[in-house]
């Protein structure tokens, strides 16, 4: 018998997402949140490489684009356990952490305090209310980063809303580095529309050209795309380097 998944609405998937990320800690949850003590290949060494790798990507772009490699106000959307925060926070004056999980906000804060005395500002938002961040963040930011998060969102529309929020928070000329999972000709790479908890890492994906257009429509000028077909964590990563109009 062929079992065909029954699609669910984006609002229901958002509710499932909120419930998942606010569940008591489990090995799977810690791994998906990229906490330091997650079950990574090579353990902490892998966790530490994540932030260094993404900082290297940003620095390469910044230098080629004439952008400062030490932005003063950095906001990360979906900080998880702080793997990126510990790399980006030390040269910033303020690191703003946005999350749907209070536990991850606390863990990220602990990790940042271990490496620097940069001001750490936690911002809790709902999985279905990314716009709450606009009121919570005072003033504009210089850099918006988002890694290993867009594929976890309940729908492509939620991704569009995060882009809109990023554009509203960034100062004109500010930079965003946003990673997505890209689609190929294979049907298995398309976005899912059912069972959030069983499809987490593959929930939402984009055609590269369509995400480029979404970013432009939100008020960005796409500058670079870096493709990573596979690394030690997963596959089909596309990094978009954007500047705010």
Image: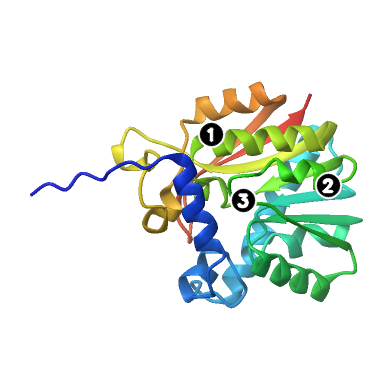
The residue singled out by tag 2 in the image is 137
Kindly give the residue lying farthest to the left in the view shown: 1
Would residue 43 be found to the left or right of residue 86 on screen? left
Quarter of the rendering containing residue 100 = bottom right
Mark positioned earlier in the residue sequence (2 or 1) = 2
Residue located at (63% from left, 65% from top): 49
Q: CA distance from mark 1 to mark 3?
A: 18 Å
Which residue is at the front of the view, 60 or 221?
Answer: 221
Would residue 209 be found to the left or right of residue 35 on screen? left
Quarter of the rendering containing residue 38 = bottom right
Question: How far from the left and from the top, in percent, is residue 177?
Answer: 68, 42
Residue located at (90% from left, 41% from top): 139
Q: CA distance from mark 2 to mark 1?
A: 22 Å
State the mark number for residue 142. none
The residue singled out by tag 1 in the image is 157
Q: On screen, 26 above or below 5?
A: below
- Label 1 crowding class (10 Å Cα cut-off): few <14, some 14-19, many 20+? few
Which mark lies nearer to you, 2 or 3?
A: 2
Residue 70 seen anywhere in this rendered image of the structure: no
Residue located at (81% from left, 43% from top): 135
Mark 2–mark 3 CB contact (< 8 Å):
no
State the mark number for residue 147. 3
């Amino acid at each position: 018998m062929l079992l065909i998944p029954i699609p669910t609405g984006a609002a229901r998937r958002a509710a499932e997402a909120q419930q998942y990320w606010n569940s008591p800690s489990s090995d799977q949850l810690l791994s998906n949140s990229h906490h330091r003590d997650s079950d990574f290949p090579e353990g902490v060494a892998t966790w530490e490489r994540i932030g260094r790798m993404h900082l290297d990507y940003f620095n390469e772009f910044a230098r080629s684009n004439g952008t400062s490699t030490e932005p003063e106000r950095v906001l990360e959307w979906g900080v998880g356990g702080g793997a990126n925060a510990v790399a980006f926070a030390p040269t910033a004056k303020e690191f703003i952490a946005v999350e749907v999980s209070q536990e991850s906000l606390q863990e990220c804060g602990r990790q940042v305090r271990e490496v620097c005395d940069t001001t750490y500002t936690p911002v809790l938002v709902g999985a279905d209310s990314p716009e709450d961040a606009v009121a919570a963040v005072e003033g504009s930011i210089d850099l918006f980063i988002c890694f290993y998060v867009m594929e976890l969102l309940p729908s492509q529309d939620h991704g569009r809303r995060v882009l809109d929020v990023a554009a509203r928070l960034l100062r004109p000329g500010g930079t965003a580095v946003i990673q997505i999972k890209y689609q190929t000709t294979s049907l298995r790479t398309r976005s899912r529309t059912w069972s959030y908890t069983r499809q987490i890492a593959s929930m939402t994906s984009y055609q590269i050209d369509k995400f480029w257009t979404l970013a432009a429509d939100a008020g960005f000028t796409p500058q670079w795309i870096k493709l990573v077909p596979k690394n030690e964590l997963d596959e089909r990563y596309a990094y978009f380097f954007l500047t705010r109009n």
